[in-house]
Image: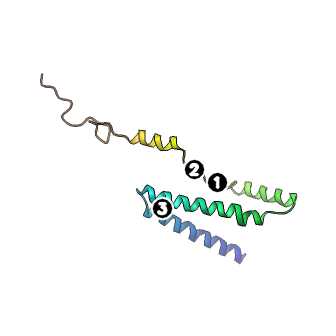
Amino acid sequence: MEQQASHSALLGSLSQVVGELVDENQGNAIGLVEVLRLLERLHRGITEGAFQDALPQNRQELYKLMRIIEEEGGWPHIPKMKLHMLYSHLTETRVEPGEEQDGGVASGSGTSGN
């Protein structure tokens, strides 16, 4: 039980540090990409190393592990943002020439001399 409490405390600390990094990089896409790259490298390293080494050696134990994983939230996955998602963000936030940020018409462009 003590090992589980230590494990939970370390995960909580790790989550807090990642959260602080995200907060510090608000508005900084490059900084946030660096955080995401680190998380992806850690995920890959754990999956391909320690996790594979810890897998059960028989079907019954593997089935039991898979059942526990599914019951506790499923398989961890870090999806990558697709290019079309980045593009859709650009088209949503793009401001046309002559328009204000809120979508209104720029001042002075709606008057006529007649």
Query: Which percent across, then down, holds residue 6?
Result: 66, 75
Alpha-carbon span between mark 2 and mark 3:
17 Å
Helix, strand or loop at label 2? It is: loop
Is residue 69 left or right of 35 when viewed as pictured?
right
For residue 81, above or below residue 61: above
User: What quarter of the picture does the C terminus occupy?
Assistant: top left
Q: Which residue is mark 3?
A: 22
Q: Tell me the mark number nearer the camera, choosing from 1 and 2.
A: 2
Which numbered disc, 2 or 3, marks the residue that appears first in the sequence?
Answer: 3
Helix, strand or loop at label 3? It is: helix
Check disc 3 and give the amino acid type: Val
Q: Which residue is mark 1?
A: 77
Check disc 2 and give the amino acid type: Lys
Badge count: 3
Q: Tell me the mark number nearer the camera, choosing from 2 and 3.
A: 2
Query: Which percent across, then down, holds residue 61?
Result: 84, 61
Name the residue furthest bottom.
2
**Residue shown at the point (42%, 38%) measured from the top left:** 91
Check disc 1 and give the amino acid type: His
For residue 113, above or below residue 52: above
For residue 21, above or below residue 3: above
Q: Which residue is mark 2?
A: 80
Name the residue furthest left.
113
**Quarter-of-image position of residue 101:** top left
> Which is nearer the eye, 70 or 57?
57
> Which is nearer the eye, 41 or 66?
41
Q: Residues within 10 Å of mark 3 (few under 14, many from 20)?
A: some
Q: Residues within 10 Å of mark 1 (few under 14, many from 20)?
A: few
Query: Which percent across, then down, holds residue 79?
Result: 60, 50
